[in-house]
Amino acid sequence: MANDFLKKKFIGLAPMAGFTDSAFRMLCRGFGADLVYTELISARGIVEDYKSGGDKSFRLARFSGKERPILVQIFGSEPEIMAEASKIIIDKLNPEGIDI
């Protein structure tokens, strides 16, 4: 299935910090975007939210089923934190992928 997706031309919504929230992603899907991304999210923020029970950064990663396919975009400079954040996102949200 993934190979079929890559064989066709598609329209993707590039992630934009401060703009690519759920409402904007839904609007873009409605106008024909085949693939959307979350905005850029701190991997450290995801990990700290998970450990503390907070949700400030994790809230940026949440999405509805109508936004699929979706990639969650994270940033950071520590490989261990990036890996831990990716695992948390995959376990909790199950997006189609992680963009680092």
Image (cartoon, grey):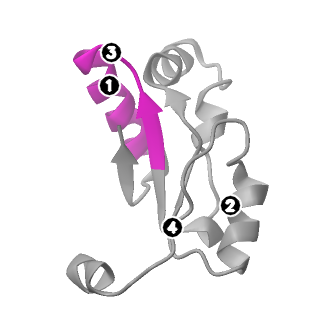
Magenta span contains residue 35: no
Label 2, label 3: how far apart the Cα atoms are: 27 Å
Secondary structure at badge 4 equals: loop
First in sequence, mark 2 or 3: give its number.
2
The residue at 67%/48% (across/down) is 20
Figure quadrant of residue 56: top right
Figure quadrant of residue 22: bottom right
- For the stretch drawn in magenta, what is the main secondary structure? helix
Residue bearing mark 4: 12
Query: Which amino acid does the dot numbered 1 rest on?
Result: Met
Q: Residues within 10 Å of mark 2 (few under 14, many from 20)?
A: many
Contact? badges 2 and 1 (CB < 8 Å): no
Instruction: Tell me the mark number nearer the camera, choosing from 4 and 2.
Output: 4
Query: Which amino acid does the dot numbered 4 rest on?
Result: Gly
Secondary structure at badge 1 equals: helix
In this rendering, is residue 63 above or below 17?
below
Instruction: Tell me the mark number nearer the camera, choosing from 2 and 1.
Output: 2
The residue at 38%/28% (across/down) is 85
First in sequence, mark 1 or 4: give its number.
4
Residue bearing mark 1: 82
Where are the magenta residues, as a range?
A: 72-91
Residue bearing mark 3: 77
Residue bearing mark 2: 25
Query: Which amino acid does the dot numbered 2 rest on?
Result: Arg
Which of these two is toward me, 92 or 16? 16
Contact? badges 4 and 3 (CB < 8 Å): no
Q: Position of residue 38 (x, y in %)?
A: 57, 47
Label 1, label 4: how far apart the Cα atoms are: 24 Å
The residue at 37%/46% (across/down) is 98
Contact? badges 3 and 1 (CB < 8 Å): no
Query: Which amino acid does the dot numbered 3 rest on?
Result: Ser
Tell me: 56 left or right of 84. right
